[in-house]
């Protein structure tokens, strides 16, 4: 798509250049020249108002605590409706490459569909260029297309991101996100085959603080700190998480190298266990870091 658009662009501007050369020659011979402003308007009209967008993000992953190898992947396809508004569908999928810990029926090489979502993104709802500030909004409506969501009775969860960004310098940008997530299930909880009783979530609030650093022209580092607060339903008194709040703090730093405008290679890490216990009473940084997942990142976009 990008190559085709570039070809059309080159042909167009080649035509404009030829017209200018002919115009200069004709002017010398007394012919009428097409005004430059008219040419600019015509060129602008050829740019499509709606542009296709999409990417595939592949992440081969290794869980340090168990030695498990997986891939965690996302594909997205949509349209850029304007310079600040886009609409797309994103779908997660994963594979299990090697697992020496789980039972045989779960340790083989498998492909699995993860949750999918309809995503609407609006940038620059408010902007203060002199202060380097901007406010954006993102909405994700998650659909229970995966087996895990269906098994626990999920109907939908709706993420509402409110993002305030601050450009600190040419190399550093900070983004503070407030994310409210109502969750709708067909039932308030579940009992597993081994008798484990679990209450379903009804609401989650998240706060993200992300620091983006442009190290070089092509090399960038993103360091987020994410705080989740989750409320569960009143299911059964013997459920450990029944009608209660739980908390989680984690990070997911990523180092990316832009090979081209459409290809990024990178390295990432995230902790599987929270840096604090679920009630925030104790820290467990060692446990969280030991049980992390390391990833190789390949992102190809349109």
Image: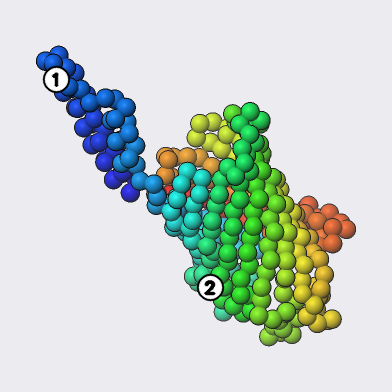
- For marks 1 and 2 on the same chain, the one whose residue lies earlier in the sequence: 1
* Marks 1 and 2 close (CB-CB < 8 Å): no
Q: Residues within 10 Å of mark 2 (few under 14, many from 20)?
A: some
Question: CA separation, marks 1 and 2?
Answer: 66 Å
Query: Could you say whether the residue bearing mark 1 is in a helix, strand or loop?
Result: loop
Q: Position of residue 265 (x, y in %)?
A: 49, 45
Q: Residues within 10 Å of mark 1 (few under 14, many from 20)?
A: few
Q: How many marks?
A: 2
Query: Could you say whether the residue bearing mark 2 is in a helix, strand or loop?
Result: loop
Q: Which residue is mark 1?
A: 31
Residue 135: quarter of image? top right
Residue 263: quarter of image? top left
| Furthest residue toward top | 28
Q: Say if 80 sits above or below 28 in the image.
A: below
Identify the coloring: rainbow
Task: Determine the residue positioned at 51% across, 45% down.
Answer: 84
Q: Say if 234 sits above or below 121 in the image.
A: below
Task: Determine the residue positioned at 50% across, 60% down.
Answer: 90
Q: Say if 85 sits above or below 243 in the image.
A: above
Q: Say if 9 sits above or below 184 in the image.
A: above
Whether residue 87 is visible here, answered yes or no, is yes
**Is 287 or 212 nearer to us in this picture?**
212
Q: Which mark is residue 246?
A: none
- In the image: residue 211, left or right of residue 70: right
Q: Which residue is mark 2?
A: 145
- In the image: residue 109, left or right of residue 14: right
| Furthest residue toward left | 29
Whether residue 106 is visible here, answered yes or no, is no
Q: Position of residue 203 (x, y in %)?
A: 73, 66
Task: Determine the residue positioned at 56% across, 76% down.
Answer: 147
Q: Position of residue 299 (x, y in %)?
A: 47, 50
């Amino acid at each position: 798509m990008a190559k085709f658009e570039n070809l059309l662009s080159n042909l167009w501007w080649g035509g404009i250049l030829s017209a200018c050369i002919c115009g200069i020659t004709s002017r010398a011979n007394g012919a009428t020249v097409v005004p430059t402003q008219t040419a600019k308007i015509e060129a602008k009209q050829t740019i499509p108002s709606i542009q296709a967008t999409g990417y595939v993000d592949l992440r081969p992953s290794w869980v340090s605590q168990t030695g498990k190898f997986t891939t965690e992947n996302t594909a997205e396809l949509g349209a850029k409706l304007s310079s600040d508004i886009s609409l797309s569908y994103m779908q997660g999928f994963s594979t299990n490459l090697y697992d020496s810990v789980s039972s045989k029926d779960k340790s083989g090489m498998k492909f699995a569909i993860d949750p999918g979502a309809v995503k609407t993104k609006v940038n620059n709802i408010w902007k203060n260029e002199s202060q380097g500030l901007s406010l954006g909004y993102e909405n994700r409506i998650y659909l229970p297309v995966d087996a895990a969501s269906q098994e626990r009775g999920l109907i939908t969860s709706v993420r509402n991101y409110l993002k305030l960004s601050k450009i600190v310098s040419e190399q550093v940008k900070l983004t503070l996100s407030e994310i409210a997530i109502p969750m709708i299930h067909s039932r308030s909880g579940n009992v597993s085959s081994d008798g484990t009783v679990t209450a379903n979530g009804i609401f989650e609030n998240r706060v993200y603080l992300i620091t983006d650093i442009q190290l070089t022209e092509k090399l960038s580092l993103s360091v987020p700190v994410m705080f989740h607060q989750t409320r569960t339903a009143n299911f059964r008194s013997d459920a450990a998480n029944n009608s209660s709040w739980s908390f989680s703090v984690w990070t997911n730093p990523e180092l990316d190298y832009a090979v081209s405008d459409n290809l990024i290679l990178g390295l990432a890490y995230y902790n599987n266990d929270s840096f604090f216990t679920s009630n925030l009473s104790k820290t467990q940084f060692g446990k969280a870091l030991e049980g992390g997942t390391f990833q190789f990142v390949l992102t190809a976009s349109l």
